[in-house]
Image (cartoon, rainbow, N blue to C red):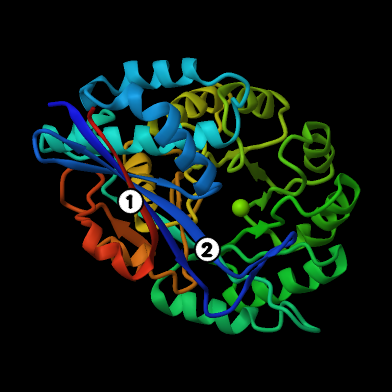
Amino acid sequence: MNITQINGYHLRFKPAEPLGNARTFIRERNFLALEVKTDAGLSGWGEVFSSPWAAAALIQRQMAKEVINRSPLDHGVIYARLLGSIGYDKRGASMMAISALDMAMHDLAARAQNISVAQLLGGVVRDALPCYASGPFIREGADPYAHYERDIERYLKQGFKAVKPRAGISPRADAKMAERVRSSIGDDLEFMIDINQGYSSAAASQAVQMIEHTRPLWVEEPVHPEDLEGYQRVANATTIPIAGGEALGSLASFNAFIASGAPTVLQPDLTVCGGFTGYRKAAALAEAREICAMPHAFGTGINFCASLQMAAATPTRHYGLSAPYPWVEYDPTGNPLIELCDISLDSNGLITLPPGPGLGLELSPDHLTPWIVEHWSVNSP
Ligand SMILES: [Mg+2]
């Protein structure tokens, strides 16, 4: 079985309301869905969530030739070749392009054996994964957190047992918001605070001290991802676990981040860190320090299904939690592209691994039609 064609589908939609975080308002969401086809008639899917246009150019002009006419069962060999083919950009768009290819090749390798990617990775530890609602998001206007209780009530009605509000307006405003969130969810459910790289280490240190009494499960990306001293300063200022890693691409960057001692929750994104291959390497570094990796996912159903597969194959860690780690991030903002996967949340906040082979995603380009803004193909010469 050899790869014969790579198709790129650039997808776009506008959220009903701009999604605000500490740095920006997301008014338009762009993704690349990558379909890798074989001469056996199978298709595997991958995703680029950040920098889709740059990653697409790299795949089309540089990486496709390393993949086409090769077997997806050789995904490890191909990964090493792709990594060796990139010159200076070890952390950015190159890793995102490799991530999508690696994800699609794992989908294919599993489909070829009629097993799930979780089985390909060593087996299913858990087939129902705790999922948390990644929201609410900051809104424009005088009171950016005003709607949080209303949104959270909706997430809890859907079955989520944990929510992750965005923060970063000011330490004082964050603290007031966290108090309101804690009182609206009660003592038995969990919430996390995501600052999306928005603060200096001084502001983040103030913020974590002011919200500590509300007992969030973690504070995520308090500072810029490469500000390791800033991360250490924030971690030293609080007993709240510090999370991060979604923006890291290279193994070296994960190594430095973990070795800083600051994070106790590692969140590689399968579309950024090198797909399943890169994720497992980063997770192994984390495991050496008894840190459980759990997937960051805020894209389409492709990365969500990939994240479910990765989490399903990950040994659980109890750590005194209401449900053992890893937990999986779910985009509850009405993203139509996450609905590409046929999954549902149960009343315990769990999503069951889809029964199909590969990623468990039955996707054809027809399903993507309403959102496609551009399509390209690279064929076997
Ligand atoms: Mg985040």
Mark closer to the observer (2, 1): 2
Name the spot of residue 370 as percent of width and height, x first.
Answer: 33, 71
Name the spot of residue 53 as percent of width and height, x first.
Answer: 51, 47
Within 10 Å of disc 2 (Cα), the crowding (few <14, some 14-19, many 20+) is: some
The CA distance from mark 2 to mark 1 is: 19 Å
Q: Is residue 46 above or below residue 183?
A: above
What element does badge 2 sit on?
A: strand
Label tally = 2
Q: Amino acid at mark 1?
A: Cys
Q: Which residue is mark 1?
A: 305
Q: Amino acid at mark 2?
A: Arg
Q: Which mark is residue 314?
A: none
**Front-most of residues 332 and 130:** 332
Q: Which residue is mark 2?
A: 29
Q: Residue at x 71, y 39 (%)?
A: 225
In the visual, does 245 lie left or right of 119? right
